[in-house]
Amino acid sequence: MLEPALEDALRAFAGGRRYHAATIERWLALDPADAQALLVLAQQLRLGENQLRDLWDWAEEIAQRDRTAVAQVLSSEPLAAARQAHKVGRNDRLKLTKAALRRLRFPQLSATEDRLAGLARRLELPRNVRISFPDFLEGEEVRVEITATSPAALRAAAERLRAAADSTICDEIFAVLGEAP
Amino acid sequence: MSTPARNHSPTPAPRAPSHWLPDSLWIERSELDSALARRLRSRLADTSVRVVDDCSEAEPRENFAAGKRRLLIKRHRGSFMQYCPAGTPGLVCCNYLVVSFASNCPFDCSYCFLQDYLANNGAVKVSSNVGDGLAEIDAVLRAHPGRTFRIGTGELADSLALDHLTDLSCELVPFFAERANGLLELKTKSNCIDNLLDVDAKDRTVVSWSLNASAVMATEEPGAASLEERICAAQQVQAAGYRVGFHFDPLVAHDGWEEGYRQVIGQVFPRLDTRRIAWVSLGSLRLAPALRAAIKARPQPSLLLTGELVPGRDGKDRAWRGLRVKMYRRMLDWLRQIDHRMPVYMCMEPPGVWGKVFGESPSDRELAERLVALPTLTAL
């Protein structure tokens, strides 16, 4: 049961953003500390219903996995840092928050993504050659994109790419992509 | 390395089987005089009976769990057989056929796709017109004499959980015993095997159990037989001449999964004759959005949703690919250490994952043919 002031604030915020009744009921049924933490998050980032639900679901799953509370998850250091990032607008702050929460939600996946990003950097490809990996690493395709404005630029990029493909780092990339460490 | 020196003799069941009984029996009026209705009325003499013209009266749509307490006897209308719903473009498929003599299951596994698939279809249903289903199977087998079909009854229901009430296996096993190109799989989480023990199945029936890590079995499979009960049942049916199968599906990436799955493999396989294991399947937990919602709505929190599940190309959430590959490789290693000849396959995985795990990716047809091949291991 929430304090009337919290319930009023929550209803006012959710009502103002036309949240569905089911979402509001789910919110009202939370532990007061969790409900309050979500309200602060939602107000701070001016979250729409779907945006809140995504973050909420992840926070809830992390809380269950780590046997803690949603409020604890939302106040953890990486989240707090993202939410208080200086000199960024609301959209970027939301992106940072979501990224921080994603790292907590998918720690092994995030570590693997970091490792792949590091390996890709070590290939020392020029700026006009971009390497990207599948979303959530659901696949083993590495996408390589070359942008060139002249035959010479294309040839130069292709040469650097060829050297990168011959390196052991390239083999390591595919090995990491194939199986979790 | 096979395990001929190990003790495969059945051990006594640890306790009396806890076979499921319904709270109420519902019968479609037109089937009141069917053999199945007569049998069930006799076996459930103390259970309240309701005769209905409209079967939907038996289905408590507001509560899927409540439906699992009701048993409905009805005539099956339409086709009994279909391709396994797991078959999906882009994923390697074993061309399994499912035949549904029942739908819904008395067990209440948190990950069960029936929560979504049968969401508005509450009661546990058994079909009174089994003969029609057998005729349909017979027609398919006769129409394709050169092809062997692997056919299971455990897709929309547990194959054996109701067998102490229905005696369905007493019709199915002899039926398949007489047919050279049909291989029946009875897939279960129960230990209802009494009907199987005195029948000569002529190697045309495989009895299989779903298995999981202890932590998953303990929290996510309410009502199902314990691991020890499943092992004892598998030993008994092996001793009675059947080959057995095992399904590690869903594999759940939870805290301690490596130790959990390694342990269960170590507990199960050394107690069986691994030369008489027809197949072992591996499948990662996969959640369609509606199933995820159903799991979330369950009264007890589930550890299923805490894993690193990400959306796949077929719209279902799974453990991310690298983690799945790691799990499959570990499982395969542990199984191979016990007997490298046990046939192992995966369910609902793309060729790329097959390549990573097995070093090859068979076509659907190749996989199907391998799984229905005669038990070559016994000849070795």
Image (cartoon, rainbow, N blue to C red):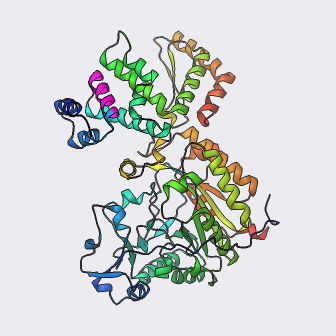
The answer to which quarter of the image holds residue A25 is top left
Query: Which of the two residues, B104 or A160, is positioned nearer the viewer here?
Result: B104
Q: Is residue B81 above or below residue B294?
A: below
Q: Residue B324 appears at what percent x and percent y?
A: 57, 43
The answer to which quarter of the image holds residue B311 is top left
Question: Which residue lies most toward the right here?
Answer: B5
Q: Measuring 71% from the left and 66% from the top, which residue is drawn there? A: B272
Observer able to see residue B21: yes
Q: Measuring 57% from the left and 83% from the top, which residue is drawn there? A: B174
Residue A38 among those drawn in magenta: yes
From the viewer's perspective, tell me whether residue A48 is left or right of residue A78: left
Q: Residue A54 appears at what percent x and percent y?
A: 35, 34
The answer to which quarter of the image holds residue B217 is bottom right
Q: Measuring 52% from the left and 76% from the top, which residue is drawn there? A: B141
Q: Residue A133 appears at what percent x and percent y?
A: 51, 29
Q: Residue B300 appears at what percent x and percent y?
A: 41, 52
Observer able to see residue B355: no
Q: Measuring 70% from the left and 76% from the top, which residue is drawn there? A: B239
Task: Please tell me whether the stretch drawn in magenta is mainly helix, strand or loop.
Answer: helix
From the viewer's perspective, tell me whether residue B351 is left or right of residue A58: right
Query: Where are the magenta residues, as a range?
Result: A33-46
Q: Is residue B206 above or below residue A111?
A: below
Quadrant the N terminus of chain A occupies? top left
